[in-house]
Each structure stands twice: as C-alpha cells, then as structure tokens.
Image (cartoon, helix red, strand yellow):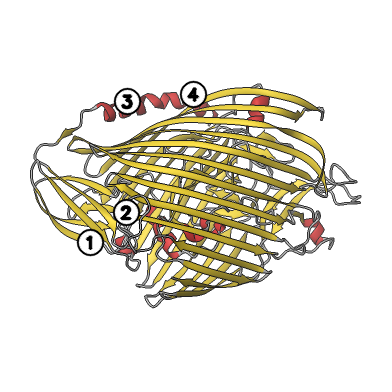
Amino acid sequence: MKQFLTLMPAWRVLPLVLLLLFICWSHPAARAQGVGTLRGAVADSLSGQPMVGVSVGLEGQAGGTATDALGRFRLDAAPGTYTLRVGGLGYRGRGQAVTVATGETNAVNIALAPTVLSLAEVTVSQPRDPNQSLAAINQIDKVLRPVNSAQDLLRLVPGLFIAQHAGGGKAEQIFLRGFDVDHGTDFAVSVDGLPVNMVSHAHGQGYADFHFVIPETVEQLKVYKGPYTARFGDFATAGAGEFSTKTRLDASQVKLEVGRFDTRRALVMLDLLGNNNRHLFSKKPESAYIAAEYNFTNAYFDQPQDFRRFNGLAKYTGQLSDRTSLTLLGSHFTSSWDASGQIPESAVRDGVISRFGSIDPTEGGNTDRTNASVVLTTGLPGDAIIRQQLYYSNYNFNLFSNFTFFLENQEDGDAINQTDARNIYGYTGTYDRDDRLGARSLHTTFGLGTRIDDADVTLRRAVRRAITDTITAGKVYEQNINAYLDETLTLTDRLTLNAAVRADLFVFDFRGLITNDEGNLETLNGRKTRALVSPKLNLYYQLTPAVQLFARSGFGFHSNDARSVVRSTSNDNVLPRALGYEAGSTFKPLPGVVVNAALWALHLQDELVYVGDEAIVESAGRTRRYGADLSVRYQLTRALFADVDLNYNHGRLVGVAEGENFIPLAPRFTSVGGLTLKTPQGFGASLRYRNIDSRPANEDNSIRARGYFLLDGVLSYTQQRYQIGATAENLLNVDWNEAQFANPSRLRGQTTPVEEQLHFTPGTPFFFKVNASVFF
C-alpha cells in the first residue's frame, strides 16, 4: 500500500479525470436532431412548496431525471405520446399523458399528494445525485424508524454505531466502516449546510457535537459512504451525512415525555404562517416555524447526572419569485452535565465501585452553540441554478475529565480541563447546469467555498474543577478554501459517468503556549499552508429499471490539528490522504423489497489519534481496510416492514508485525434491524436490535472491547389531533459496555502494579419513557 500511495499519487490519476471534465465542460451543447423537450415543476399539493429530488421519467423509456433545487425538471425525448411518471416516497405517484413534438417545448406542472408509505414507489437510481446510492434506503428509514433523540438521528446512517462516554452532553464516539471515528475524524456531518465537525477542537480533531438538532425537525438524511463525492472535503473519508430540517410543519405540536431516572422532556413546534394565506416577503408559497425543546435527566449512574439541555430553532422558507427561493435559519443550543466517565474493569470486579459508580465525581461540563444561515437559490436561463449560503456559528465548550485518575498525580489526581471558544464563518456557492451533448444529458456542478475557524483553545490541569496550571493555551486560526468541478454524463441510455476533481487549500495558524518535551511551557507561534487535489471517478449502469450497478473510486483526506501542524517540522501528515474504491448494486428483486450491497476498500495514509490529556496528535501510521455492506428493506404487508443492515469490516495497520497490527476499537461485524408496524388507523410499533461484536482494544489484541446485543421497542398511536407513545430501551436489561478504551490508570492509594486494562462507560439498563403530543 505504501508503494501505491507514493508511486500512484493523485496527480497520476488527475490527467484522466481532468480530460474527462474538459471534454464534458468544453463540448458545445448541441440539441439532438428530431427530439422535443418536456419542462415542468413538481410541488407539494398541501403547501405549494417545490419538491426537490422527486423522480421524473417517461413510462417505457430508459433513463429519467429528478427535480432540481427549485422543483423543476427537463426531459428530452423523440416525438410521440407518453405517460409521464412522477413519484416520491410518501407521496402518491402520478401518471399524466404528454405529447412530445420535434423542436418544441411542452410545459407540465405536477402537484403530489402525501399518502401511506409504499416501497413500490421507490426508485433505485438517483439521476441528479448518483453518488447517494443509499438514497432509497435512507428515505425509507426516515419514515419508518423511530427517532427520539439526536443519537437516533445518527443511527439512521446504515452501519453507523455510536457510544457516549461523558454524561450525554458531549459528542458521541462514532463507529463506521471499520473506523473508530472518535468524535468525527473520518465522518463529515452537516445540518442544513452548516458544518458540524470542528477542526483543531480542544477535545478532538473533527469533533462533531450533533445535539443542537431537534429530532422532530429533521426531514431528510443523505448518506455518502467513502470519499467519492467532490462536494465533501475534510473528514469525509469513511463517509458523510447531510441532514436537512423541515421546510414546513404539517401542524403545530406540543409534546411531553417522562421516563425513568428522572427523565423529562418538553417540545414545542409552532407553525407561524399556517394555511391562511399569510405572507412575510412575497405572495408566493412561504412557510415559517419555530421549535424549542428542553431535556433533563439524572441518568442511571450512582452520581446524579443533572443533565440539562435547551434547543431552539427558527426557520423561514419561501419563494420570492418563480426563479428565486430564500431560506433563513437561526438556532441556539446550551447544555450542562455532571459525568461519571470511564471506569476500570478491575475497580468493579474488586468491589471498589458499582458498575454505575465513578472514580472522579467532579467530571462534567457545559457547552453551547448559536447558528445563523441564509441560503439564496436562483434559477438562471439555460437550465442553470446558483445556490449561495452564508453561515456563522458561535461555539463554547468547557469539559472536565479524568482518564487516568491518580496515575501521574497520586495526591490530587489527573483531572484536566479542556475549553474551546470559537467563531466559524463560512460561504458555499454552487452553480448547477443541465446541458445536452448530442443525444446525451450532461449535468455540471461547480462549487466554491471557504470556512474560517477562529478559536481560543486551552488544556489545563484541575483539582475538583479548580484550575491549577496550564498545559497548552492559545489562539487557533484555520481557513479552508475549496473548489470543485463535478460532471455527470449519460454515456448511453444505461451507462452514466460521474467524474470530479476537488482542490483544497488550508491555512493553519497557532499563537500561544505549549508544553515541550521537557514538560516546560514554551511559546509557539507558527503558520503553515498546504494544498491538496482529490480526483473522483464513478460509473453507474442501469441494468434494468429495478437494478443499478455501480463502481466508485476517489481520493479524500482528513486534516491534522493546527497545533500539531505548526509544531511539526514535517509536512507528511498535515493532510493525510485516503484512497477508497467499491463496487455494488442497488436493486429491487420484488416491488416491495429494496436492497443495497457493496464490496469496498479504504487505504489511509496516516491514521491520526488525538490524545486529549496532552493536546497532541499521535500518528498510528498507514492503515488498510476492506469490507462488505448489505442493507435490505422489505414491505411484508401494507402495514408491516422489516429491515436489516449487515456490515463486515477488516482493518489492519500497515507495515507492523502480524499480531501487533490491530486497529484499536475498529469494529469487525455490526448489525441492526427490526420490524415496524404502521397501520392506517394510526397504530405504530417497532421492535429493533443492535449488535456489535467484541473487538481489539489495543494493537496486540491482548485487551478486548466487549460486544453487545440489545433490543429496543417503540409503541405509538396517532390521530389528527394527538399522539401517545412509549419507548423502551434495553428490553432484556443486559449489562453492556458503551464506550470502551484500553489504557493504564491508578486508583487512590493503589499499591499494586499499574497495568493497561479495559476502561468503560456502562450502557443504559432497562429504560422506559412515555410521551404525549397535541397537534393544532
């Protein structure tokens, strides 16, 4: 693998990709002789809002298209009479007779009405977004799977597991495709275009705290596994997840939840415009709503958690004209908690503490985030669209942790305090255009963006939350400037080529104090600039209307922490490169069955591990992973659905002796699945399982992180004006470890030798809560 990364870098592949892009970009768009054009728009029949990504095609004809960001579509066809088919999951599909005449354009506008879920409506191709091969799966999951928390939202990503190890107020540890992603180092997350991952964060590179999202406001999830999509840059090696919140509410809602362990939650969602033809900025379709939630729990630990969280969101979406739409968003999140942290297995085994006890009861912290975003989407002549987004986030983080207890300081303990206070400024712009190359369609996307992180970060020692001294402190300034060109060309009626290239420029700057190798504080002022080019090449073959085959490849990367970049004399691991490739299929063996299967491999030039109690990044060296994913969704009856995700992963350190080359905490086999019932009368039920196998916790596999199998259940009854429900987690009440790490530690007064051992955060015991909602 080392030879491949050094002898076949991106520039060896780049000429081919650039040639393909140049051909696609420079070829004059010529209308094929003897064809006509259908143009139109698709809207929601209730709100009048344009529908994005709806499939549109001519019955009996190969290919098809999907609606763009303004709900518009274009189809070219030979003269004749056809049936135009328009459909989207959760909407009643429509067929309409249309006539195509040579050299003429026929306008067709369609309104779709919501209806009960039917997998027969699902299409396996994504003509506007081909790299989202899990689109059909994700659409189904969002409708079927119960979502009760921000954690549940992340679990909507097929094959993704999470673990919490700091009292519920901190970002989860993520596992995906053989990665222990830590808090986001190799999985990029965004919400309404706002990046969630934090660069050079005080607690970990790529830190992605998703808790500022109110679950009931999420409308859509797009999942992209692997580094194959040019739109994503930093951290999108194992994949990326794009969440979108609702553009409108079906009804206003008040919801209350009460559960074990003093758990309480209140939610309010208010539709500000309703259906009474009230308007703010235009006389065209508009929507506006606000949402707020408050959470409290003491959790199941011996020490009360006193966890409190507030979320608020306001969003406006409207058409200013036939060619222009505007989205405004503002949100605020704040949270505080006490944590029990990871505990050593030996302390529980020897009876020093209970399974739900703590060694250092002073752990915990608080955090907040405020977001603002404006998106302007404009349609241009010639089937082009410009989307522009400006965003701003103000973020604060304050965490007290103790990983080793009394290992270094046997008198006062090893507690540390990490703080992060930052402002994030960003812009993303895309230009989308549909053209013709003879008889073939070409979709072009050009993207341009920048992001600036301006942060004050510290790492200090503490005793019972009182600061004693400083390990590192300073100001991080980090900017990313990026551009990409993405071309999707239908080579034949069945074969589609997607070729893209992305360029990223990073500026790393740190000014402050840092502890040197002798343990003394020294001044560190430095600045480095580094650029990277990432080509992508993907092929899609529509074998039949129900079977799509794909082969994908691409280079990606994850960035290093600015403090490590500036401190290092080498540039080798500033932007470690990832190479991924896979082959698979999305298909429907039956009208009510959707399957996605893929064989994949991912090579990482440098596996970076953030050491939080030293504020340094350690290099684990090169890694190699391969695996297989299988996702199945099956509509057994009109009301009963089954689903399963099976994921096998094999990963190893490269260039390390056999038996000492395990990647710590990398999962080998994961599986989730369940049965879901949704009746027309409003009754719903779901029984779900989660399974992850035992895996190495260190490089020589001498310590094992323990796997688990859990069952969860959900019941609900929904009518027009109200809903009642109940949720049960860990129905079998098994003892399971959520977060797990192998490291040395010492208890107060311990005289026995210190050894590396498994430390863990216990998972939730049997947990039950009920909820009630009123709609108005």
Q: Is residue 406 visible?
A: yes
Residue 260: x %, y % from top left: 66, 71
The residue labelled by disc 1 is 94
The residue that disc 3 covers is 19
Q: Could you say which quadrant of the image residue 323 lies in? A: top left
Q: Which residue is mark 4?
A: 7
Type of amino acid under label 4: Leu
* Cα–Cα gap, marks 2 and 3: 35 Å
Q: Earlier in the sequence, mark 1 or mark 4?
A: 4
Q: Measure the alpha-carbon separation of dots 2 and 4.
A: 46 Å
Crowd rating for badge 4 (residues with CA inside 10 Å; few <14, some 14–19, many 20+): few
Residue at image point 61% right, 71% down? 258
Give the residue displayed 27% in from the left and 48% down from the top: 542
Kind of residue sitting beneath label 2 = Met
Q: SS at mark 2?
A: loop
- Dot 3 or dot 4: first in sequence order is 4
